Image (spheres, rainbow, N blue to C red):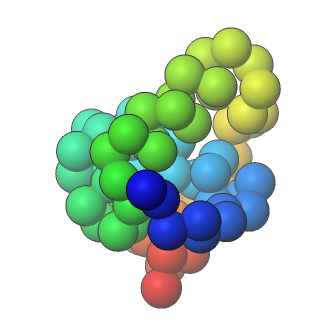
Amino acid sequence: MGTGRQYDDEFKKQAVKLAKEVGNKAAAEELGIPKGTLGTWLNRARAGEIDTGAGTRSVEESLNIAQ
């Protein structure tokens, strides 16, 4: 059973971008989220449900969102 933690859209967007840069496992570990959760977001991004846009944040800035 999940923790019921809610993530805002910006966090999801940045997590997807990070996963594309460093890989799913590394991104999930860095952000402290389950790989399955990140996988769901990646699938939603591929389906166009999460708009990742061009973005302007670096990987380091994205990691700071999780803190």
Residue 17 drawn at (x, y percent): 51, 42
Q: Is residue 25 left or right of residue 20?
A: left
Tell me which corner region of the image, top left, top right, bottom left or bottom right, holds residue 4. bottom right
Q: Where 49 falls versus 64 (above or below)?
A: above
Q: Is residue 4 left or right of residue 20?
A: right
Q: Quadrant of the N terminus?
A: bottom left
Residue 26 drawn at (x, y percent): 22, 51
Q: Disc count in the image? A: 0
Q: Where 33 falls versus 53 (above or below)?
A: below
Q: Where 57 falls versus 49 (above or below)?
A: below
Q: Is residue 28 left or right of residue 43?
A: left
Residue nearest the observer in this picture, 42 or 64:
42
In percent of the image, x 64 and y 25: which residue is there?
44
Residue 57 drawn at (x, y percent): 60, 59
Q: Is residue 26 visible?
A: yes
Toward the bottom, the furthest residue is 67
Q: Is residue 59 visible?
A: no
Residue 39 drawn at (x, y percent): 43, 33
In percent of the image, x 48 and y 85: which residue is there?
67
Residue nearest the observer in this picture, 61 or 34:
34
In percent of the image, x 73 and y 33: which residue is there?
50
Q: Is residue 29 left or right of residue 2?
A: left
Toward the top, the furthest residue is 47
Q: Where 28 falls versus 25 (above or below)?
A: below
